Image (tube, rainbow, N blue to C red):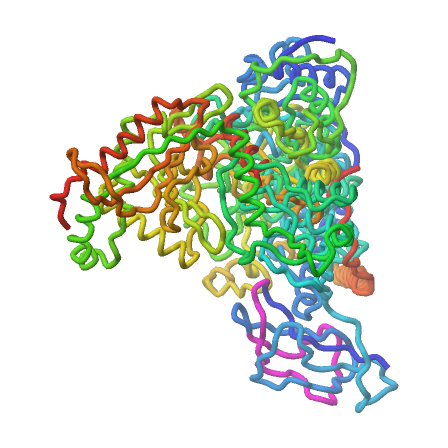
């Protein structure tokens, strides 16, 4: 067991898999000599060599397309997007090639795309994007979103071993802020399984990424101030979603709050709401509520960003309102 | 001293046997295209019907230069390349007709299939999207220290898509074993070359990538073969990609629903006189490699193969609706 | 016998129809497969159509110059040469795949006891309805369950509590009082409805006894009053106020006021103005208590208790600190009208910080009103009557009234209560009679 930061755990996950399987390699901008913009691949070039740690030209479409091509013929590439915001430059390769290949050709495309995502870091509109909704909609892609170092390593390993294109969301806000216990053993966190972070029977709160910790704090505060116990579920995996954990939690509590930092409209929260309305209607004692970023690009100035993104205060306000319904 | 390579003679050494083979593939390609058009006009085929009429020499000559273990990533007017690489005509028509037994189980049409055994990875509708993929396949081959080369194509229009630049640049700077043929057939749908590019020659772009570029007569099947052979070998020796501009003419519309009335008829007449198959036939006849009886034999052969394949495909069952929902994810 | 359909092809993804330009063959002709059979025209292109099969052209179903949709049958070829012209139609293999609609699968939540009519118009959540159905709670019973949720909604807790109590055989339990301010229901008109409960009948037999289920409104009021008394140690201070000057002023100006404003001038704006001025002097009156915290409000939301057929309602004048005499009059009138027409919204009866209860209209001289939680004081105004009073050491007939301030002795003591009430009285007695409309 070792204590490490969230980004260190991501790094460890990749390192262990590259040691274990020679077909795993890393490609992206500045991943080699520089060790990656966030240092996720620091030391990799020295240990694995330049054949397996490739500094590519500045070409997201080429990075993602080449990763798809290499995966198609049996390699297991990990493509790094320097910021999730730039994945749009290679969008076509992901949705037109990677996502559709197995459906049409029955050939696996075992590629991982690492996406440093999200705000709370004063990054402004082009360094704070939450990309998940763009891809959530596309059949053929998987999406994971760890919020703890333990899950970061476990899901990285799972993503690399998965035979499908997996989008791995890394939350920049959590990179060095979150530390946790990470076993040194070879363990995998199953894709498609959420985790219960806090038990409760009054409200089910579903979240992922940076907002999970805010939600936990809000739930604890609510318990102390009002005696209302919220069950906090960290989804961890968006595609596929842990639908049985979601529905079971609704049945146990009757009230639902979904929290994510992605924009409200068209966000994953909407799909979860529809799922609940469709399959757990008879268990609802209140309308399903969502708390998400306002429908604007993430702004630069700190007061603006704060206003737009969810935080502990907003979460507890939403929880309170829901508990009083 | 040229290295000995399996199957194909080195550049410049095409014997009569090989040339007759080339002629057979040229005829087969054209007749397949005509059959596809017929099926479409008979309402037996849906979607879009794309032919490579006028492009046969480029498609056939280039693929003929490949080794068995090389990869082929063809575009929508390169049916001849599929056939040369070893694809069966039956499979071609099962794909066109969307049948359950096609290489995509009816999930995609035309040439959008993959055949890992033959190492053919078909295109998708987004032009130039396969160029980065070609770079990736080449990268994997290089990483595994294999001697495979990836041959892929793009049109004069498609060469202006961003992924052309990104993919080719990456292949060039990383010295990946890729050969890219730009099939300049003068038109991208209704848009003539002059509205697509300001550069004088498409192959001039190669300078920008630091790779060799060459423009050739795409109606000369032997020339195409020889040029590709050299480029493939260069790539195989680790010297990186080559850009080959193969100049032809698109003799039919963009697809069967396009009558190409925007093409000046003089241009069509001019290029009819440069029909790649007619030209090659004249050459073979004059060298006594082919005679009338031999030609009739080949024609009969071609007709037979196609008729059988079309009949087979037309009689084959469609996939069933419920089949559509599985296979989105690999296990 | 094998009939092959000739169909109109789709010459392009967006093409939906085609026109037959010319048939190259006529009925009775032999045709060969792939031979040109007809010419068509579409939005995109004109095209020659090769024959789909070899045989006899036995029928042309669409003539030249006619336009038909894509995939429509335009003729038939008989391919079995031993069966000649005049063959009847057989079903040919479909040339195109058909798209079948999957039946929509809907999951219907178990419905409420649908046969019984809902009386109150209350909202019941899906969960509450499923519990009701599962536990055999009739609609009538459900109507009577106390709701502690938003807008008196029956929550999961409420119905589960009801079930517990029912199991124990007790009469319907009253749920825990909520901490939110009083809200009254707009639905029931009675204080209660007669019910038949065997256990109670035994104890209170008919016809000597009538057993009524308390209406929600009544239950709410009962809850609120009990809770208020339990929460605040009530103390009452009574002061007498000489309303004569105001009575006169009102008489003099009533007509003009009504002409200006369109509604009658009552005593209420005078009293409200005096009270608001006094609250500004003694802001502690305008606060609430939480544990050992005093929450003092900078705004004054003045509630005016009204006894209506819907029970006790306290509409609130928001931000009274910003208003003047005429503003008060208008606000009071507006609330009165809306209350009468039952057109007020939850906001109108929420958020009060001080309440005035005018039981004087019923003739009561002195009252001891109960504080409206979470406020800390309430002013009761008694009837204005002509009485003998001492004025400048002489006997005079004056219009007098008793005002009672009930206040919460957790934070207000007799001194403060007395001083506040005294200020109200002084404000009224020193009313500027020169005010005109």
Residue B255 position (above or below residue C203):
below
Q: Is residue B287 above or below residue C71?
A: above
**Position of B302 compared to C284: left or right?**
right
Q: Residue furthest left?
A: C434
Q: Is there any visible trace of residue A223 in the rendered image?
A: yes
Rendering coords of residue C404 (x, y %): 37, 36
- Say if residue A69 shows up in the picture: no
What residue is rendered at 42% in x and 52% in y?
C344
Q: How many marks?
A: 0
| Magenta highlight range | C13-41
Q: Position of residue C202 (x, y in %)?
A: 78, 52
Residue C20 within the magenta-colored segment of the rendering = yes
Instruction: Name the foreground residue: C14 vs B227.
Output: C14
Q: Position of residue B236 (x, y in %)?
A: 68, 27
**Which one is in front, B319 or A133?**
A133
Q: Nearer the viewer, residue C403 or B315?
A: C403
Q: Quadrant of residue C418?
A: top left
Residue furthest bottom as drawn: C86
Decide: is A37 above or below C342: above
Give the left or right position of residue C255, taking residue B88 as reference: left
- Quadrant where the N terminus of chain C is found in the figure: bottom right
Tell me, yes or no, whether the highlighted magenta stretch contains residue A209: no
Q: Name the residue rendered at 80%, 60% in the picture.
A: B309
Please provide percent x and percent y for residue C86: 80, 91
Identify which residue, B55 or A318, lies in the foreground: A318
């Amino acid at each position: 067991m070792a204590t490490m930061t969230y980004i260190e755990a991501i790094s460890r996950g990749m390192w262990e898999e590259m040691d274990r399987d020679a077909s795993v390699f890393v490609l992206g901008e500045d991943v080699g000599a520089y060790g990656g913009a966030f240092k996720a691949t620091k030391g990799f070039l020295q240990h694995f060599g330049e054949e397996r740690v490739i500094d590519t030209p500045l070409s997201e479409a080429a990075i993602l397309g080449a990763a798809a091509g290499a995966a198609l013929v049996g390699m297991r590439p990990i493509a790094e997007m320097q910021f999730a915001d730039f994945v749009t430059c290679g969008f076509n390769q992901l949705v037109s090639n990677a996502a559709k290949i197995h459906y049409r050709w029955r050939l696996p495309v075992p590629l991982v795309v690492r996406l440093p995502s999200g705000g709370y870091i004063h990054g402004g509109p082009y360094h704070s994007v939450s990309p998940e909704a763009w891809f959530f909609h596309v059949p053929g892609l998987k999406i994971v979103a760890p919020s703890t170092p333990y899950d970061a390593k476990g899901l990285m390993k799972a993503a690399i071993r998965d035979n499908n294109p997996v989008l791995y969301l890394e939350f920049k806000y959590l990179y060095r802020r979150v530390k946790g216990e990470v076993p040194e053993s070879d363990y995998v966190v199953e894709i498609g399984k959420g985790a219960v972070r806090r038990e409760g029977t009054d409200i089910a709160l579903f979240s992922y990424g940076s907002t999970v910790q805010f939600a936990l704090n809000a739930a604890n505060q609510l318990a102390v101030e009002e005696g209302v116990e919220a069950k906090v579920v960290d989804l961890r995996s968006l595609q596929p979603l842990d639908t049985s954990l979601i529905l079971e939690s609704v049945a146990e509590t009757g009230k639902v709050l979904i929290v994510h930092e992605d924009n409200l409209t068209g966000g994953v929260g909407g799909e979860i709401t529809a799922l609940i309305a469709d399959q757990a209607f008879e268990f609802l004692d209140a309308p399903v509520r969502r708390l998400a970023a306002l429908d604007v690009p993430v702004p630069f100035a700190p007061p603006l960003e704060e206003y737009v993104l969810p935080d502990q205060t907003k979460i507890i306000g939403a929880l309170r309102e829901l508990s009083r319904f | 001293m040229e290295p000995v390579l399996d199957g194909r003679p080195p550049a410049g050494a095409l014997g009569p046997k090989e040339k007759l083979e080339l002629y057979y593939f040229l005829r087969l390609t054209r007749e397949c295209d005509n059959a596809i058009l017929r099926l479409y006009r008979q309402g037996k085929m849906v979607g879009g019907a794309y032919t490579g009429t006028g492009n046969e020499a480029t498609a056939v000559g280039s693929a003929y230069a490949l080794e068995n273990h090389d990869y082929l990533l063809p575009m929508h007017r390169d049916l001849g390349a599929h056939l040369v690489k070893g694809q069966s005509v039956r499979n071609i028509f099962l794909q066109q007709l969307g049948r359950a037994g096609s290489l995509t189980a009816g999930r995609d049409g035309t040439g959008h299939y993959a055949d890992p055994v033959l190492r053919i990875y078909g295109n998708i509708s987004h032009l130039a999207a396969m160029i980065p993929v070609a770079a990736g396949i080449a990268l994997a081959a290089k990483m595994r220290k294999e001697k495979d080369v990836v041959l892929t194509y793009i049109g004069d229009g498609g060469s202006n898509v961003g992924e052309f630049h990104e993919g080719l640049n990456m292949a060039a700077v990383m010295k990946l074993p890729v050969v890219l043929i730009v099939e300049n057939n003068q038109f991208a749908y209704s848009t003539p070359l002059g509205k697509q590019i300001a550069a004088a020659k498409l192959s001039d772009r190669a300078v920008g990538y630091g790779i060799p570029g060459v423009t050739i007569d795409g109606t000369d099947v032997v020339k195409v073969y020889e040029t590709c052979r050299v480029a493939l070998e260069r790539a195989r020796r680790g010297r990186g990609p080559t850009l080959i501009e193969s100049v032809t003419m698109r003799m039919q519309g963009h697809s069967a629903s396009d009558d190409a009335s925007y093409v000046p008829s003089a241009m069509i007449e001019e290029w009819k006189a440069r029909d790649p198959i007619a030209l090659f036939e004249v050459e073979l006849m004059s060298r006594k490699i082919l005679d009338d009886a031999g030609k009739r034999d080949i024609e009969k052969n071609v007709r037979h193969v196609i008729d059988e394949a079309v009949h087979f495909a037309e009689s084959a069952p469609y996939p069933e609706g419920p089949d559509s929902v599985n296979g989105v994810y690999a296990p | 016998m094998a009939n092959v359909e000739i169909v109109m092809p789709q010459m392009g993804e967006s093409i939906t129809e085609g026109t037959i330009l010319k048939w190259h063959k006529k009925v009775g002709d032999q045709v060969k497969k792939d031979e040109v059979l007809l010419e068509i025209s579409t939005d995109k292109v004109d095209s020659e159509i090769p024959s789909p099969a070899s045989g006899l052209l036995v029928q042309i179903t669409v003539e030249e110059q006619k336009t038909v949709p894509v995939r429509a049958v335009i003729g038939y070829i008989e391919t079995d040469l031993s069966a000649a012209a005049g063959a009847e139609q057989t079903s040919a293999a479909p040339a195109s795949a058909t798209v079948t609609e999957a039946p929509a699968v809907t999951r219907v939540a178990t419905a409420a006891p649908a046969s019984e009519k809902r009386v109150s118009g209350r909202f019941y959540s899906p969960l509450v309805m499923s519990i009701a159905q599962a536990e055999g709670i009739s609609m009538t019973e459900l109507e009577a369950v106390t709701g502690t949720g938003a807008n008196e909604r029956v929550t999961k807790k409420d119905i589960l509590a009801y079930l517990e109590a029912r199991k124990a055989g007790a009469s319907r339990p009253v749920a825990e009082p909520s901490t939110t301010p009083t809200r009254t229901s707009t639905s029931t008109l009675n204080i209660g409805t007669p019910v038949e409960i065997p256990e109670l009948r035994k104890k209170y037999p008919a016809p000597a006894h009538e057993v009524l289920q308390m209406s929600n409104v009544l239950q709410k009021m009962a809850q609120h009053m009990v809770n208020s008394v339990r929460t605040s140690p009530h103390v009452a201070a009574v002061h007498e106020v000489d309303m004569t000057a105001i009575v006169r002023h009102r008489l003099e100006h009533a007509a003009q006021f009504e002409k200006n404003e369109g509604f009658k001038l009552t005593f209420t704006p005078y009293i409200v103005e005096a009270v608001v001025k006094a609250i500004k002097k003694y802001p502690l009156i305008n606060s609430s208590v939480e544990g050992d915290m005093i929450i003092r409000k900078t705004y004054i939301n003045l509630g005016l208790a009204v006894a209506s057929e819907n029970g006790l309602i306290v509409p609130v004048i928001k931000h009274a600190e910003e208003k003047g005499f005429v503003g008060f009059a208008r606000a009071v009138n507006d609330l009165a009208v809306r209350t009468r027409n039952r057109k007020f919204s939850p906001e109108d009866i929420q958020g009060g910080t001080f309440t005035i209860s005018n039981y004087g209209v019923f003739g009561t001289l002195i009252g001891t009103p109960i504080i409206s939680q979470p406020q800390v004081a309430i002013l009761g105004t008694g009837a204005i009557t002509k009485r003998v009073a001492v004025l400048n050491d002489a006997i005079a007939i004056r219009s007098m009234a008793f005002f009672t301030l009930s206040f919460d002795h957790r934070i207000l003591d007799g001194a403060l209560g007395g001083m506040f009430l005294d200020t109200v009285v002084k404000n009224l007695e020193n009313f500027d009679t020169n005010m005109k409309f």
